[in-house]
Amino acid sequence: MTATALASFAASRRRQAVIAVAGLTLLCLLLTIVAIGQGAFAIAPGRVAEILGTRLFGDAAELQGRDALVVLNIRLPRVLLGLLVGAALAVSGALMQGLFRNPLADPGLVGVSAGAGLAAAATIVLGDRLLAGMAMKLPFAALPFGAFCGGLISTLTLYLIATRQGRTSVATMLLAGVALGALAGALTGLLAFLSDDRQLRDLTFWSMGSLGGASWTKLFVIAPIVLPLLLAVPLLARGLNGLMLGEAEAYHLGIPVQRIKALAIVLVAISVGASVAAAGVIGFVGIVVPHLIRLAIGPDHRLLLPLSALGGATLLVAADIVARMIVAPAELPIGIVTAALGAPFFLWLLLRRASTLDG
């Protein structure tokens, strides 16, 4: 390519990035307002914006009545939790795809989410039984820690199985992920068999995913875990761009390959663990969002990672709106909605890749 063609291509990519950022930001804001007003007690978007504006810039003492109570104490923490979880899952998917150099990698598909869910289930069932004799209540902070440990163990196990002599086998990665997910599902089923009625309800929540249990307390526990990770993730962009060329080539470019891989594994484990602890197992966000962003603006992780966070937040809030509308006044588990949207996309992606290889 000539210098003029390269400059034109770079300018086109910048325009696409600006359009993507502006469009996703506007869509996310609009869906946030709609989601806060959506529910059995509907509140008009204009009224939602008025309440939020008064809370941020006006006299909070003026916020009286049922509308303000519902918006500030029930809907707002739910939507903010959805934004955090969606961003964490999408960025985790982008990190895994960069680490394994394959767009099919995803924390849910390769068993990381199942491992985190298993650890959370063990924390619920076994933790309650261990603390029962001491007349203590299981602290909520134990759930993110347990889910983090489960996600970390699953991610490390997957990487060790799929990597030989510095090379990662995609086929081995996917098959090992299926096996790890099946094993985690079997052990989670065993814990469900051993659980009492209350623990079984909690386990059902983890297995299908939901934002229904959101509260300011839960949000204040999860936010300090997820927000620093989302801010630190762009620091990996250069290393992941180098890994796209291969580990040997990235090493010769001066990229600390092993450090990048270790940091990516830890970040994925923390993000997925915190997300599972807060909202249960929610699949396909980590594969759909990064792939769509990659199609729109290219594979440069300097843009891919932050835009994946924005896109994941937008997608999960949209899925939560659908989950509350489709069977209103009841609520559909959000994991069902994301699976219904993501599974056809994943099949399309597989067929598209197969036709490309055959061609």
Image (spheres, rainbow, N blue to C red):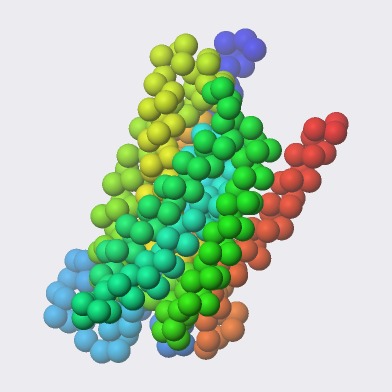
Q: Is residue 357 visible?
A: yes
Q: Residue furthest front?
A: 133
- Residue 153: % across, % down: 44, 47
Q: Residue at x 35, y 32 (%)?
A: 235
Q: Residue at x 41, y 19 (%)?
A: 255
Q: Give the mark count.
A: 0
Judged left or right of residue 286, residue 342 is right
Pick the front one: 346 or 277:
277
> Where is 226 relative to 63, above or below?
above
- Residue 351: % across, % down: 78, 46
* Res. 150 image quadrant: bottom left
> Where is 348 relative to 218, above or below?
above
Which quadrant is the C terminus positioned in? top right
Which quadrant is the N terminus positioned in? top right
Q: Is residue 14 visible?
A: no
Q: Residue at x 79, y 39 (%)?
A: 354
Pick the front one: 96 or 7:
96
> Where is 189 relative to 263, above or below?
below
Judged left or right of residue 195, residue 3 is right
Q: Residue furthest right?
A: 359
Pick the front one: 281 or 83:
281
Q: Residue at x 38, y 52 (%)?
A: 149
- Residue 124: % across, % down: 38, 71
